[in-house]
Amino acid sequence: MSRLARTAGLTDVQQEILSTVRNFVDKEIIPVATGLEHRDEYPTDIVEGLKELGLFGLMIPEEYGGLGESLLTYALCVEEIARGWMSVSGIINTHFIVAYMLKQHGTQEQKDTFLPRMALGEVRGAFSMSEPALGSDVSAISSKGVREGDEYVLDGQKMWLTNGGSSTLVAVLCRSDEGHPEGTAPHKSMTTFLVEKEAGFGEVRPGLTIPGKIDKMGYKGVDTTELIMDGLRIPANRVLGGTTGRGFYQMMDGVEVGRVNVAARGCGVAQRAFELGVSYAQQRETFGKPIAQHQAIQFKLAEMGTKVEAAHAMMVNAARKKDSGERNDLEAGMAKYLASEYCKEVVEDAFRIHGGYGFSKEYEIERLYREAPMLLIGEGTAEIQKMIIGRRLLEEYRLEG
Ligand SMILES: Cc1cc2nc3c(=O)[nH]c(=O)nc-3n(C[C@H](O)[C@H](O)[C@H](O)COP(=O)(O)OP(=O)(O)OC[C@H]3O[C@@H](n4cnc5c(N)ncnc54)[C@H](O)[C@@H]3O)c2cc1C
């Protein structure tokens, strides 16, 4: 077990889950990850293994067939999985956010319908806020849901759906003006619709098309897609929570736990980069000694190890804060910001330690180098995290009078 990124105070159950996941990552993910990634191939066998481990239901309450575990347990599992291959953590992340939103905000009927099958991984979730013209500025969403009798008719185009093709349940954020007079703040006139569909590409349901996979520089294997709604009819009981106008808050709640998750991914990728760097530095010799014996390289390793440790501590703090029932947007924003920036820096240093070989596709660090930038963008860019952190700090440190 690694000396870095240990977590004090875990229960026996948490330790057992983590050790099982770590074993799975070492045996079933790391040996095949780079090959699958280079072929942009969906990791079907790995996903089946995750189902068997119960990871799709890790945080779903036991009454719905899940393991009922905390956000901390979940985040530590994600860290382990991302250490093996970040794309695999992406496969469970949007599923986890949708399950979390259902648990927190769903009607009883919605929970009973979806959560038991989500816990088994039979129903798989994706969540969709972004559109071609917007990502950071969610208030500018233009996709629309209009009520017609017992249904809503959805129109619009969505962008960047992680698991857009493989999922069978998509939480889609749309503007829905019904009951919200003109002039209502944009975030008060948005609704989350629970859209069921077939897995795959093309017209997966009348009025709903998933055109195909977006070709990406990294984060391959997991499918990222557009979603086009053209007169898509959704029964009124598929409004998340049963009431319109709450979608923005529901999505932001989901994104908040998602941020801890992205921080955990950054921690996992950085750990793997450190492992690769520290190992290579002891094998490669220049000027008559292993490069690890040159102080410049040792300093790099020292900085990398410190960053791995600091990011892990902040991520664990943010998860524990949420688990305690307290508001954690400040801690989650800080953890996401720091872990993703540090991840990029640790990966860059490990890449440099590899010299020319880091540029070869034969070395794992090449894959990590293409994966790390995604963490600077997903679940809110670094600039957006800093806006959240700045606003919250000014709230906390407001001058009296
Ligand atoms: C691989 C991948 C998977 C994704 N998966 C999903 C998903 O599953 N579901 C989903 O809904 N979305 C998903 N996204 C979308 C992602 O959330 C957005 O890309 C992200 O929020 C940024 O939005 P944008 O790309 O529109 O950039 P923009 O919002 O256009 O921002 C462009 C630049 O301007 C900066 N900027 C924007 N506003 C400000 C401001 N006010 N002040 C300072 N700087 C600012 C940004 O930080 C960024 O640097 C995914 C994206 C990628 C790349």
Image (cartoon, helix red, strand yellow):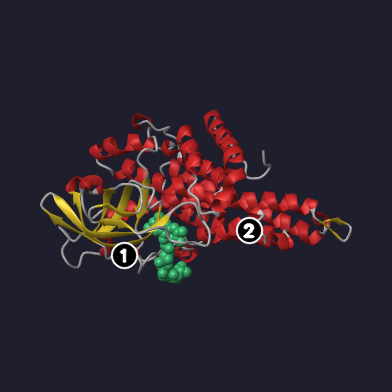
As displayed, is residue 131 above or below residue 267?
below
**The N terminus lies in quadrant:** top right
Q: Which residue is situated farthest in the left direction here? A: 149
Residue 392, image x, y percentages = 43, 59
Q: 325 or 152, which is in the foreground?
A: 152
View quadrant of ligand 1:
bottom left
Labels 2 and 1 touching (C-beta < 8 A): no
**Is any part of residue 15 visible from this angle?**
yes
Nearest to the eye among marks 2 and 1: give it: 2
Q: Check disc 1 and give the amino acid type.
A: Ser
Question: Mark 1 highlights which residue?
Answer: 139
Residue 50, image x, y percentages = 48, 38
Q: In this view, does 301 lie to the left or right of 23?
A: right
Classify mark 1: residues with Cα within 10 Å, few (<14), some (14-19) or many (20+): some
Question: Mark 2 highlights which residue?
Answer: 366
**Is any part of residue 392 visible from this angle?**
no
Q: Check disc 2 and give the amino acid type.
A: Glu
Give the residue displayed 64% in from the left and 58% down from the top: 361
Q: How far apart are marks 2 and 1 (CA)?
A: 37 Å
**The C terminus lies in quadrant:** bottom left
Q: In this view, does 185 lie to the left or right of 67?
A: left
Residue 338, image x, y percentages = 55, 57
Give the quarter of the image for residue 213.
Answer: bottom left
Q: In this view, does 285 lie to the left or right of 170?
A: right
